[in-house]
């Protein structure tokens, strides 16, 4: 029997990889599209509920942008339990997705913020200094640091202790919400909401011809807000399910890299990082508190609620054993904590609300260090897609 080869590879394999690559990219598109639609709907929902700028912008919007990477482990774990198959791979994907978001936020996202201050210094009123609300920055980073330290510690305890930590983390994020909403200092000024997307669609499909204003997009009906939020949630779930399947395929069939590592590196880039480019725009407009709050608020969320899911329903594979997936997972968490600690200490020492961007640039070094260690594990040690616990 003969097989057609393309550059030394069977044509069937090349065709399969191409098709699955398209599906993987498609999952990214669905996740981003769903996050954008969901955030737009949730901001209007916050207005309908009478929530202030702080809760709507820094809590609801932060949770909305974090929803895709949060649903990835949910879909992976739930799908494995319902099907009874692939539970180990699903658990690895879940752990990677959960750990990837805080790691990226504390490293690359902070690095981009620091670089942006320098790049736009010529057009900024604040120049090359980062002007932030120290109180809100300290609060976000403190809640993230305490929660994430406990999450890491949960990997080294067993039994009821893990349940206690999980329950505390839920309480901890609830306390964070209370403190943030009570302080009401996370958003600078009144932000005008973008028109509701579904309201615009209804408008173009033939809204009430008697109205001569901007119509349903600028002043949407409550049912359109609710329906858009539900549609966005369905799109995100579909994208998350597709992402889980494609990461598992590439891990097992193509690159032979542990699913946890692929998920850790790919999930936040597809779901978290694009949203954080808003921070760059805000920095260019001298809205530094908004820019940093967009990141630290998401860190407070990612370091508490999603990790609770990992602690209670996955292997939560973090170890100190060099050459294992668990070590890379643990390393990502440690680097995220160190980066956050540097910023927290700097904010604590600051008394002028003015900060040099140098502490933010350290995150880029940590990310480069992690990528280097991952490459060493894969290409030198030979860490494969077969989980090592």
Image (cartoon, rainbow, N blue to C red):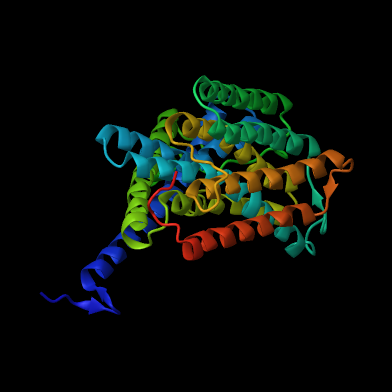
Q: Position of residue 269 (x, y in %)?
A: 51, 54
Q: Position of residue 209 (x, y in %)?
A: 39, 40
Q: Is residue 181 left or right of residue 260?
A: right
Asked if residue 138 is positioned above or below residue 335 in the image, the reply reads above
Q: Quadrant of the N terminus?
A: bottom left
- Looking at this rendering, what residue extends furthest in the left direction? 1
* Quarter assignment of residue 183: top right
* Quarter assignment of residue 338: top right
Is residue 236 among the parts visible in the rendering? Answer: yes
Q: Position of residue 119 (x, y in %)?
A: 73, 64
Q: Is residue 297 left or right of residue 100?
A: right
- Looking at this rendering, what residue extends furthest in the right direction? 351
Q: Position of residue 335 (x, y in %)?
A: 65, 48
Q: Nearer the viewer, residue 60 or 189?
A: 60
Asked if residue 274 is positioned above or below residue 330 in the image, the reply reads below
Q: Is residue 131 left or right of residue 173?
A: right
- Residue at image location 68% in from the left, 36% down from the top: 145
Asked if residue 191 is positioned above or below residue 143 in the image, the reply reads below
């Amino acid at each position: 029997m003969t097989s057609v080869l393309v550059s030394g590879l069977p044509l069937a394999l090349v065709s399969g990889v191409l098709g699955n690559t398209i599906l993987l990219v498609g999952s990214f598109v669905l996740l981003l599209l769903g996050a954008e639609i969901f955030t737009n709907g949730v901001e209007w929902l916050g207005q309908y509920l009478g929530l202030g700028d702080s809760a709507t912008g820094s809590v609801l919007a932060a949770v909305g942008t974090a929803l895709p990477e949060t649903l990835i482990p949910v879909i992976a774990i739930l799908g494995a339990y319902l099907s009874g198959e692939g539970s180990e791979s699903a658990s690895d994907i879940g752990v990677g997705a959960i750990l990837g978001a805080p790691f990226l936020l504390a490293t690359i996202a902070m690095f981009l913020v620091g670089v942006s201050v320098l790049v736009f210094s010529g057009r900024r009123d604040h120049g090359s200094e980062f002007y932030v609300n120290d109180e809100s920055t300290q609060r976000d980073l403190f809640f993230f640091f305490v929660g994430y330290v406990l999450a890491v510690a949960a990997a080294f305890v067993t039994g009821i202790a893990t349940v206690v930590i999980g329950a505390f983390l839920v309480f901890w994020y609830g306390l964070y919400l209370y403190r943030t909403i009570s302080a009401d200092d996370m958003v600078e000024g009144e932000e005008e909401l973008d028109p509701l997307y579904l309201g615009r669609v209804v408008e173009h499909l033939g809204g009430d011809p008697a109205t001569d204003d901007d119509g349903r997009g600028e002043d949407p009906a409550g049912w359109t807000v609710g329906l858009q939020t539900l549609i966005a949630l369905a799109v995100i779930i579909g994208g998350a399910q597709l992402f889980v399947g494609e990461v598992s395929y590439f891990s097992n069939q193509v690159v032979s890299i542990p699913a946890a590592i692929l998920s850790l590196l790919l999930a936040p880039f597809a779901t978290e990082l694009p949203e954080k480019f808003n921070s760059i725009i805000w920095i260019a407009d001298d809205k530094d508190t908004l820019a940093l709050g967009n990141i630290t608020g998401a860190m407070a969320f990612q370091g508490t609620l999603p990790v609770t899911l990992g602690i209670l329903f996955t292997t939560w594979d973090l170890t100190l054993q060099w050459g294992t997936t668990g070590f890379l997972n643990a390393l990502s968490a440690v680097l995220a904590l160190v980066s956050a600690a540097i910023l927290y200490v700097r904010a604590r020492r600051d008394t002028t609300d003015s900060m040099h961007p140098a502490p933010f640039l350290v995150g880029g070094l940590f990310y480069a260090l992690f990528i280097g260690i991952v490459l060493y594990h894969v290409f030198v040690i030979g860490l494969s897609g077969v989980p090592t616990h």
